[in-house]
Image (cartoon, grey):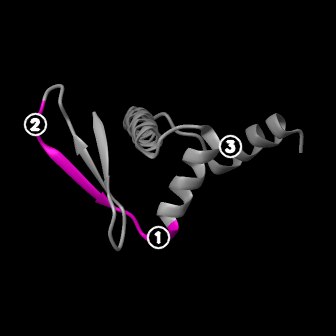
Amino acid sequence: MTVGFFWGFRWSLLFALKAAYNSRMEISFAPELEAKLSRIASQTGKGPDEVVRELVASYLDHDEWFRQEVGKGLASLDDGKAVSHEELRRQMDRILGS
């Protein structure tokens, strides 16, 4: 995956997916977000394209995990497995030492 920068009123990232697809994706950033991206890239010694790829991959991995965990919770509820608010409070108090 390569990312090219086009200068203008706002940065745009152009993603060329060379492995499996020949499609492109353009993402426009507000100036504040562009500044944050530049700062993070500079602080980490990475290019902005690498930072964006890592952030998107991390977000998608987390989103996938979260959806699976919610599915497990809903399945538990469907199976009649639930914890009352009071029981949850006791467990949290025990864990946190409150």
Q: CA distance from mark 3 to mark 1?
A: 44 Å
Q: Label 3's element? A: helix
Q: Percent from the top left, x then y, of residue 62?
A: 46, 37
Front residue of 56/27: it is: 27
Name the mark on residue 31: 1
What's the residue type where badge 1 is placed? Pro
Q: Which residue is mark 2?
A: 22
| Magenta region, residue range | 21-32
Where is residue 41 shown, x and y percent of the image? 55, 45
Q: Residues within 10 Å of mark 2 (few under 14, many from 20)?
A: few
SS at mark 1 in the image: helix
Q: CA distance from mark 3 to mark 2?
A: 50 Å
Residue 70, position as x, y percentages in the image: 42, 40
| Outermost top residue | 19
Helix, strand or loop at disc 2? loop
**Residue 28 lies within the magenta run:** yes
Looking at numbered disc 3 in the image, what kind of residue is underneath it?
Leu
Is residue 73 visible in the rendered structure shown here?
A: no
> Which residue is tagged 3?
88
The image quadrant where one finds the N terminus is: top left
Q: Going from the N terminus, do you reach mark 2 or mark 1 first?
A: 2
| Residue 84 higher or lower than 35, as above or below | above
- Residue flagged by tag 2: what amino acid is it? Asn
Left or right of 67, for residue 14: left
